[in-house]
Image (spheres, grey):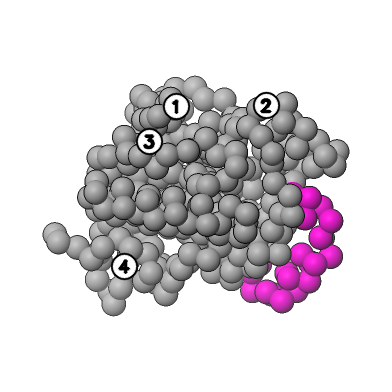
């Protein structure tokens, strides 16, 4: 894979619709295009990738779906990589469901096909829980399957290790099978539904949430520091052909080169983190910051462009 441009970011035919392809992905493996009965059906490009909108959540920065129009516009397909809406949080669910329908309407108006991947806050989406582009060279998955306990910093995970081990004992194949691993991640997500939620968007409020109990902050920091290594470990086991792994979940955006692979976390729309956009088209993957104003989300300039599958191989990417 050839790196064409780089920037610095600190870790912080008419074709069947993409939604039909996504449902088929429950039974067949996506590879940017997917194999169905030995025929290749390509997704419409450009494919835009976003994650962790958390629509309707009390502290989500997205207060109006219309503000997302500039961010959606121009994409033929948008992959929403998990935690798009608050499926499990009863106190936010009705508002979130309404905003989700508005998002689907906006996509229709823009001629954009949405694909929704499952996350730990919305595990009920159909499909395999991951997507592959560029013949398997790009892997997209939310990220909650990377760690044993899904969200190790959550109060419920800290207190519920015995129950999580019991869930693992019921999914023996999860150690070696990607589909079973993602099914287990969904079960863990349903077990770890938070009993309390952040009460404000201000930095001091978010810090106070993070340090109670004290080990929560330590586990959060550990997850931030090790997410890229965990993503590479996941790809080594389940997706060995992946050159790029795109995740969300950790609410900490960043770009890392690890053991011959590139890991990109597209961040989140909750404070204090920021968000990234990614586009894939004609063999090129680009990435940049999402520029946020009170009433508008737009794509900032690309901070990285990669030629996927190019020679020299990925190990020589700068």
In this rendering, which labeled residue sits more in front, label 1 or label 4?
1
Q: Up-down: is 180 above or below 2?
A: below
Q: Earlier along the polypeptide chain: callout 3 or callout 4?
A: 4
Separation of marks 1 and 2 at Cα, in angstroms: 17 Å
Separation of marks 4 and 2 at Cα, in angstroms: 41 Å
Residue 61 visible to an observer of this rendering: yes
Q: Residue at x 57, y 25 (%)?
A: 10
* 222 vs 270, nearest the viewer: 270
User: To which residue does mark 1 refer?
Assistant: 294
Residue 291 coordinates in the image, percent (x, y): 42, 26
Q: Earlier along the polypeptide chain: callout 3 or callout 1?
A: 3
Residue 67 image label: 3
| Label 4 residue SS | helix
Q: Up-down: is 63 above or below 85?
A: above
Look at the image and give the residue range highlighted in magenta.
154-175
Q: Residue at x 46, y 68 (%)?
A: 126
| Label 2 residue SS | helix
Q: Residue at x 71, y 76 (%)?
A: 170
Whether pointer 1 and pointer 4 mark residues with C-beta atoms closer than 8 Å, the reply is no
Q: Earlier along the polypeptide chain: callout 1 or callout 4?
A: 4
Separation of marks 2 and 3 at Cα, in angstroms: 23 Å
User: To which residue does mark 2 refer?
Assistant: 203
Separation of marks 3 and 1 at Cα, in angstroms: 8 Å
């Amino acid at each position: 894979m050839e790196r064409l441009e780089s920037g610095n970011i600190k870790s912080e035919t008419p074709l069947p619709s993409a939604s039909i392809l996504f449902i088929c992905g429950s039974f067949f493996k996506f590879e940017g295009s997917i194999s169905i009965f030995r025929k290749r059906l390509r997704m419409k490009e450009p494919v835009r990738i976003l994650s962790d909108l958390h629509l309707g959540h009390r502290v989500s920065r997205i207060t109006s779906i219309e503000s997302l129009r500039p961010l959606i516009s121009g994409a033929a397909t948008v992959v929403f990589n998990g935690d798009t809406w608050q499926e499990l949080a009863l106190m936010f669910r009705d508002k979130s469901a309404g905003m989700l329908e508005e998002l689907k309407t906006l996509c229709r108006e823009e001629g954009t096909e949405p694909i929704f991947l499952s996350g730990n806050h919305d595990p009920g989406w159909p499909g395999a829980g991951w997507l592959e582009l560029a013949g398997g060279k790009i892997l997209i998955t939310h990220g909650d399957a990377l760690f044993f306990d899904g969200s190790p910093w959550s109060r419920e995970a800290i207190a519920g290790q015995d129950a999580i081990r019991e869930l693992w004992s019921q999914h023996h194949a999860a150690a070696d099978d990607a589909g079973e691993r993602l099914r287990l991640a969904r079960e863990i997500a349903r077990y770890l539904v938070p009993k309390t939620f952040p009460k404000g968007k201000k930095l001091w409020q978010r810090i106070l949430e993070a340090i109670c109990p004290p080990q929560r902050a330590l586990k959060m920091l550990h997850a931030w520091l090790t997410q890229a290594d965990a993503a590479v470990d996941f790809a080594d086991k389940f997706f060995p052909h992946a050159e790029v792994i795109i995740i969300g979940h950790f609410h900490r955006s960043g770009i890392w080169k690890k053991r011959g692979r590139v890991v990109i976390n597209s961040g989140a729309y909750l404070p204090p983190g920021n968000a990234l956009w990614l586009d894939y088209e004609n063999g090129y993957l680009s990435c940049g910051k999402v520029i946020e104003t009170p009433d508008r989300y737009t794509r900032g300039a690309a901070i990285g462009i990669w030629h996927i599958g190019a020679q020299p191989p990925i190990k020589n990417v700068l």
